[in-house]
Image (tube, rainbow, N blue to C red):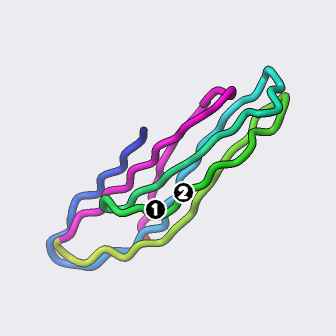
Amino acid sequence: MAVLAIPPHAQRERSFEIFCRLEVANKGSHADATHSLRVLVNGALEWSRSVPTLAGGNDSLDLRLRRTVPAGQALRVTASAETKRSTRLLLTITAEED
């Protein structure tokens, strides 16, 4: 699981572009390998996807979203990943403020 917590700004609204990335490997070339990514924003489900993992190499799931955060409010993004017969290599969340 990866968590990104952005503290509130007391005086102004802010906008963020958020990137979530899951990278996995299926080095064993398992035909039934899968990987999934689930993203919560402030505790609410924003996005969830489960897909077959490419056999014999690396694969990924990516999500890009924008959020405007009112003054005085925090932003919390949580990404969780699951794999079946594949290996998680990387799970990241980054945010860029506009």
The residue segment tinted magenta is: 73-97
Q: Which mark is residue 48?
A: 2
Q: Which residue is mark 1?
A: 96
Residue at (60, 45) in percent of width and height = 36
Image coordinates for residue 32, horizontal then vertical, percent: 77, 33
What is the quadrant of residue 16 in the picture? Answer: bottom left
Looking at the image, tell me whether mark 1 or mark 2 is earlier in sequence order.
Answer: 2
* View extreme (front): residue: 32
Q: Residue at x 81, y 38 (%)?
A: 54
Callout 2: SS: strand
Q: Is residue 44 magenta?
A: no
Category of crowding for the residue at label 1, using alpha-carbon neighbours closer than 10 angstroms: few (below 14), some (14–19), many (at least 20):
few
For the N terminus, the quadrant is top left
Magenta stretch: includes residue 85: yes
Q: Quadrant of residue 42?
A: bottom left
Q: Nearer the viewer, residue 62 or 71?
A: 62
Q: How many marks?
A: 2
- Tell me the kind of residue under disc 1: Glu
Measured as percent of width and height from the top left, residue 63 is found at 58, 59
